[in-house]
Image (cartoon, grey):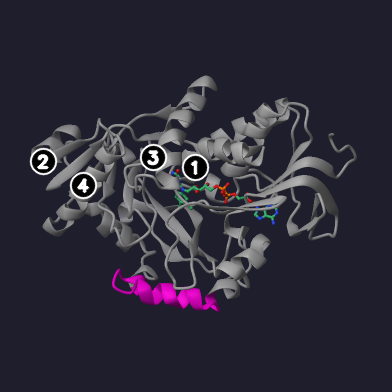
Amino acid sequence: MALKSGNEFDFIIIGAGIVGLALAREILIRRPGIKLCVLERENRIAAHQSGNNSGVIHSGIYYKPGSQKALNCLAGYRLMLEYLRENNLPFEVCGKIIAAVAEDELPALRRLYQNGLDLGLDKIEWLNEEQCKTIQPGIKALSGIWVPYTAITDYKLVCESLVRDIRQLGGEIRFQIEVSQVLQNHDIAILTDRKKVSFFTRKAIVCAGLWAGQLAHTLTNQKGLTIIPFQGRYYDLKQAEKFPIGPLIYPVPNPAFPFLGVHWTRHLDGSISLGPNATPAMSLSNSGSRMDVLNFITKAAFWKMAWRYRKQGFTELMKSGSADFFAVQGSRFGWKIQSNDLKKGKMGIRALMVDQTGQVMDDFVIIHDSLITHVLNAPSPAATSSLSIARNLADEIL
Ligand SMILES: Cc1cc2nc3c(=O)[nH]c(=O)nc-3n(C[C@H](O)[C@H](O)[C@H](O)COP(=O)(O)OP(=O)(O)OC[C@H]3O[C@@H](n4cnc5c(N)ncnc54)[C@H](O)[C@@H]3O)c2cc1C
């Protein structure tokens, strides 16, 4: 039986990022006529990670076969391309080269190639120096992997389209409602916002990105999990036309570190950005409070993470925000970039979940707690994977 009055719903989803919106759409498709509402703290959708990312539709090559990331990225890739086609949204399958520029990067590049084959990505190709240049004239690399699957899109447009679907299917989105507490009482979950307004629902799903830990603090405290915000800054090339880049160009990632490294990304409008870097952020949002930082910097997990990743240059990371840093990183692939070729671009803040030993949680983490489901860790490639995460979550919830 459907709940009726103003603040009573069958399903409430907290967070209008791409994961929450994809899930709302999926539930409404499967259960026509139910009362569903998405509550969002900002005055717009995709205000955080989903609207401030690289816009890449990942192939899945980086992820361990059998992991949630691999399963959802492979399935999500196909679903996302299908969704973009069906809804006439812009995208381009431009491919990417993962390029090794030093001998000591070759073993990791070989492992990555094998991982791609193990995942069934049978169109990837190992490239020698000349073959790299054939695909991307001007590139300087010892070897590379050609990943023809990789595509680019604009995830903000995807989110806007999901909102249209949700509204057409009878769902609701309410903005500027910041949920501060989620409780369970028998068969009803009660959500309270900062202004003490209550919402009642049969099922709540928390898709709150950087704030997911705060809304699950009993769970995260029990499990010793902490979300650390990591800033991802981009610099844009002032004259993109001087750099005729076809595919995206990525470095070989350090397998011990949870970021892909500064890459060349071409966007749908022809602009090119370098980034993102990865520095611990001082707040959870671009406009957020400095008090946020106390929530994680006082936790042992943060300092354990800093210690654990010291060899990967954790302290150097803190200094990696300058245009000079981006110019050096960008120039690794053969094109000479000076800092004055660059202008500051956008910035996104990633939610990175670490356990009590400071180890970064590599995979997606979703926990079902009776009437409340918490999407606790949905870092990259969760935008690519969103439609698949939504399908699997809907299977479990419904
Ligand atoms: C710099 C960067 C680059 C990336 N590049 C890629 C890429 O190229 N490809 C890819 O697949 N992925 C990429 N990602 C990852 C991807 O963007 C995220 O994994 C994905 O957007 C997560 O979506 P989400 O809906 O879980 O979180 P979010 O987009 O962060 O949404 C969470 C929402 O919840 C809302 N919220 C939070 N707390 C509350 C509350 N208490 N009450 C109400 N609302 C609340 C927030 O305002 C927000 O709108 C990148 C991420 C970053 C930051």
The spot of residue 133 in percent (x, y) is 14, 37
* Nearer mark to the viewer, of 4 and 3: 3
At label 2, the amino acid type is Asn
Badge 3: how crowded within 10 Å, few (<14), some, or many (20+)? many
Q: Are marks 1 and 2 in contact (CB under 8 Å)?
A: no
Quick one: label 3 or label 1, which is nearer the N terminus? Answer: 3
Mark 4, residue position: 99
Mark 2, residue position: 128
| Dot 3: element | loop
At label 1, the amino acid type is Ala
Mark 3, residue position: 58
| Dot 1: element | helix
Q: In terms of depth relative to the viewer, which is nearer, 1 or 4?
A: 1
Quick one: label 1 or label 2, which is nearer the N terminus? Answer: 2
Q: Is residue 151 above or below residue 272?
A: above
Q: CA distance from mark 4 to mark 1?
A: 24 Å
Is the residue at mark 4 in contact range of ligand 1, meaning its CB lies under 8 Å from it?
A: no
Is the residue at mark 1 in contact range of ligand 1, meaning its CB lies under 8 Å from it?
A: yes
Mark number, residue 383: 1
The spot of residue 378 in percent (x, y) is 51, 51
Q: CA distance from mark 3 to mark 1?
A: 9 Å
At label 3, the amino acid type is His
Badge 4: how crowded within 10 Å, few (<14), some, or many (20+)? many
